């Protein structure tokens, strides 16, 4: 069996177990952690995770963050000036871009289809690398998580610390990690 098959099986075991209702938003987050070199295979396999979620009796909504930066940049009035002087972009990235992405995700988390029995699955987080921190994004939307927020995370989880794309600096987070190795 492949790593991604093992990962899908571990996800299914977790998502099929009864859900606690009295958790804080941050504790309703699940990070499905896989090696970054498996990103394309994971994208091709995402439908398997949806089927397993629905078979467990939960709804599924998929959010793809891959094109958030180009969408945000296209909406910016002064985008041409950012190409002339990219340093002007730094302040906007720290505030406006984070708000743009978090509002997009919040819109899905709070729509009428997102219930206490729903999974909102997020892919494309790697495309945000260098623009914002995933941990800060999750913190911004944690209060809006009704069911479970499942973040497909290309990186690794070790000793309680997540690292996106193998970056040297990682962070501790309250999310439940699911990896291809059993028992993590």
Image (spheres, grey):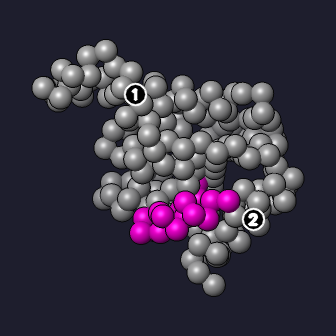
Examine the rendering and report whether any part of residue 132 can be seen: yes
Q: Main secondary structure of the magenta part?
A: helix
The circle on residue 134 is none
Q: Secondary structure at mark 2?
A: helix
Q: Which residue is mark 1?
A: 72
Which residue is situated farthest in the bottom direction here?
1
Magenta stretch: give its range: 31-47
Residue at the image position 63 percent from the left and 84 percent from the top? 1
Q: Name the one closer to the observer, 68 or 92.
A: 68
Q: Secondary structure at mark 1?
A: helix
Examine the rendering and report whether any part of residue 29 can be seen: no
Specify few, some or many for label 1: CA neighbours under 10 Å numbering under 14, 14-19, or 20 or more: some
Residue at the image position 54 percent from the left and 25 percent from the top? 103
Residue at the image position 64 percent from the left and 76 percent from the top? 6
Q: Classify residue 124 as left or right of residue 174.
A: left
The disc, 1 or 2, on the residue closer to the chain's N-terminal end is: 2
Task: Name the mark nearer the viewer: 1 or 2.
Answer: 1
Q: Which residue is mark 2?
A: 12
Can you say which quadrant of the picture contains the C terminus?
Answer: bottom right
């Amino acid at each position: 069996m492949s790593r991604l098959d093992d990962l899908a099986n571990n996800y299914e075991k977790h998502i099929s177990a009864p859900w606690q209702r009295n958790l804080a938003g941050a504790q309703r987050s699940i990070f499905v952690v896989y090696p970054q070199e498996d990103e394309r295979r994971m994208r091709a396999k995402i439908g398997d995770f949806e089927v397993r979620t629905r078979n467990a009796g939960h709804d599924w909504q998929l959010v793809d963050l891959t094109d958030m930066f180009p969408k945000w940049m296209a909406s910016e009035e002064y985008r041409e000036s950012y190409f002339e002087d990219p340093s002007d972009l730094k302040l906007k990235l720290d505030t406006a871009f984070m708000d743009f992405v978090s509002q997009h995700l919040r819109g899905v988390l709070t729509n009428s289809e997102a219930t206490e029995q729903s999974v909102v699955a997020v892919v494309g987080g790697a495309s945000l690398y260098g623009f914002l921190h995933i941990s800060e994004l999750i913190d911004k939307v944690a209060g809006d998580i009704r069911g479970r927020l499942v973040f497909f995370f290309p990186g690794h989880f070790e000793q309680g610390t997540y690292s996106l794309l193998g970056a040297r600096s990682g962070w501790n987070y309250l999310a439940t990690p699911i990896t291809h190795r059993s028992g993590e």
